[in-house]
């Protein structure tokens, strides 16, 4: 009985495996739907439609409109996230030189003067008494008292 390789042609099995490995490593699966996938689906749908019963024009316009709306929502979300990040940076910067309070690791309130701010992480960190405290852990702000 002939093997599958003999029946299917002259393609070398090692070449097939190498091609499959190259394709699988070069293309990681996407975890979210984006406009590129949406357009690929629409084009595939158009390519594979029944010629005797083509896709309804209204349905195609509806799908294209949905794509445009999805892109706008994505853009608005990105803009909102950037705006929120900027607001956090401004709020943290305005704390420098002021008395701030936060809950310490033992659960007791800690108060000190904010001396600097770090923007290295996604949430700014305010330095209070030599210790970096995440902005979202700060529970109060008062004007610094001068001795």
Image (tube, rainbow, N blue to C red):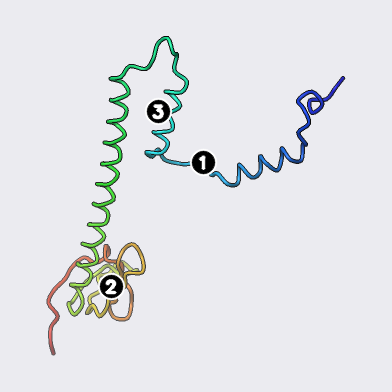
Q: Where is residue 72? Give x, y as percent.
A: 26, 41
Label 2 CA crowd tier, 10 Å (few <14, some 14–19, many 20+): many
With 58 as the anchor, is 98 left or right in this view? left
Question: Which of marks 1 and 3 precedes in the sequence?
Answer: 1
* Quarter of the image with the N terminus in it: top right
Q: Where is residue 75? Give x, y as percent.
A: 27, 46
With 23 as the anchor, is 140 left or right in this view? left
* Quarter of the image with the C terminus in it: bottom left
The outermost residue toward the right is 1
Residue at point 38% right, 39% down? 34
Quick check: 57 above or below 52? below
Mark whose residue sits in front, 2 or 1: 1
Question: Which of marks 2 and 3 precedes in the sequence?
Answer: 3
Q: Where is residue 23? Give x, y as percent.
A: 61, 42
- Given residues 45 and 87, the one toward you in this image is 45
Quick check: 103 above or below 23? below
| Residue topped by disc 2 | 126
| Residue topped by disc 3 | 42
Label 1 CA crowd tier, 10 Å (few <14, some 14–19, many 20+): few
| Residue topped by disc 1 | 29
Residue at disc 3, secondary structure: helix
Residue at point 24% right, 46% down? 76
Mark whose residue sits in front, 3 or 2: 3
Gap between marks 3 and 1 measured at Cα: 19 Å
């Amino acid at each position: 009985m002939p093997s599958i390789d003999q029946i299917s042609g002259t393609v070398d099995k090692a070449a097939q495996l190498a091609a499959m490995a190259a394709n699988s490593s070069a293309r990681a699966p996407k975890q979210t739907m984006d406009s590129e996938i949406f357009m690929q689906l629409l084009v595939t749908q158009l390519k594979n439609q029944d010629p005797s019963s083509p896709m309804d024009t209204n349905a195609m316009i509806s799908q294209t409109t949905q794509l445009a709306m999805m892109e706008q929502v994505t853009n608005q979300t990105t803009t909102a996230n950037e705006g929120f990040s900027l607001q956090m940076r401004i709020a943290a910067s305005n704390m420098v030189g002021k008395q701030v309070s936060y809950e310490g690791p033992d659960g007791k309130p800690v108060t000190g003067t904010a001396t600097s701010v770090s923007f290295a992480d996604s949430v700014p960190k305010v330095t209070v008494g030599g210790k970096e405290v995440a902005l979202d852990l700060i529970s109060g702000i008062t004007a610094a008292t001068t001795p």
